[in-house]
Image: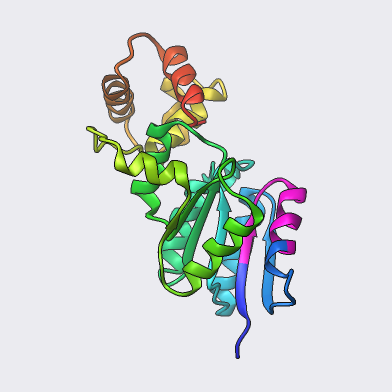
Amino acid sequence: MKAERILIIDDHALIVEGYKNVLLRDNEQYNIDTAYSCKEGYKKLKLARNEGIFYDIICLDMNLPAYDEMNIFSGEDLGLLSRKWFPQTKLVVLTMYNDNYRLYNIMKSLEPESFLLKRDISPQEFYTAIQKCLEGNIYYSSTISAMLRSTITSDFVLDKTDRSILHFLSKGIQTKELTDYIPLSLAGIEKRKRVMKEIFDIKGGDLVLIDFAKKHGFL
């Protein structure tokens, strides 16, 4: 019987060790790799792609130190890369975000096989979620399930370019300089900013947009 290979990406070493202890508690055989940032996660994924390594499951935190050089700013970006490079791999998203709009965006963009709010789950529930995924089933924690049952009227989802604009603006880079970082014209960037403000129903300049994005977990 083959040992399933699992990649855990989370920037808290104690949490990673906790996940590993849960998975290995009954002497079960897993090949577990770990990473603690977007940069380390990217390198693990690239190595796996180059060497033909297959991960059965990738456990992925959303709030990770960014890897600016590769325009990877969050776990969501790593999740999108995982979907592109390893479409058969099961994706387990774990997050502290509790804003329904942010959670809905993650769900729409990544469509994870398991979506867990960290505050919801016990070690046993984490173990159950992994087993369900390996069996080919879907598993969501209680808050995620409740969010999906609620009525969400907007289908607007921030894509990677939108999140890149927010990221660089939050670093103090002015809009007129964003064309050095993002492959869009200045008019295209301004349009995306305008659409985000309209969808978020906010008025004001870049600081207002950045403040909203931070409060709702987009930064």
Asked whether, in this view, residue 118 is left or right of residue 11, the answer is: left
Q: Using the image as rendered, state which of residue 151 and residue 82 is in the foreground.
A: 151
Q: Is residue 59 magenta?
A: no
Residue 119 location in percent, x, y? 59, 40
- The answer to whether one can see residue 105 in this image is no
- Report the quarter where the N terminus lies: bottom right
Relative to 125, is 205 above or below?
Answer: above
Relative to 135, is 186 above or below?
Answer: above
Determine the residue positioned at 54% across, 43% down: 74
**Which image quarter: residue 175?**
top left
Q: Using the image as rendered, state which of residue 5 and residue 1 is in the foreground.
A: 1
- The answer to whether one can see residue 4 in this image is yes
Range drawn in magenta: 7-21
Residue 191 location in percent, x, y? 27, 25
Residue 37 location in percent, x, y? 66, 48
Determine the residue positioned at 42% across, 35% down: 102
Asked whether, in this view, residue 138 is left or right of residue 21, the answer is: left
**Which image quarter: residue 146?**
top left
Determine the residue positioned at 65% across, 50% down: 10
Residue 73 location in percent, x, y? 54, 41
Q: How many marks?
A: 0
Asked whether, in this view, residue 134 is left or right of residue 67, the answer is: left
Q: Is residue 19 magenta?
A: yes
Relative to 195, is 139 above or below?
Answer: below
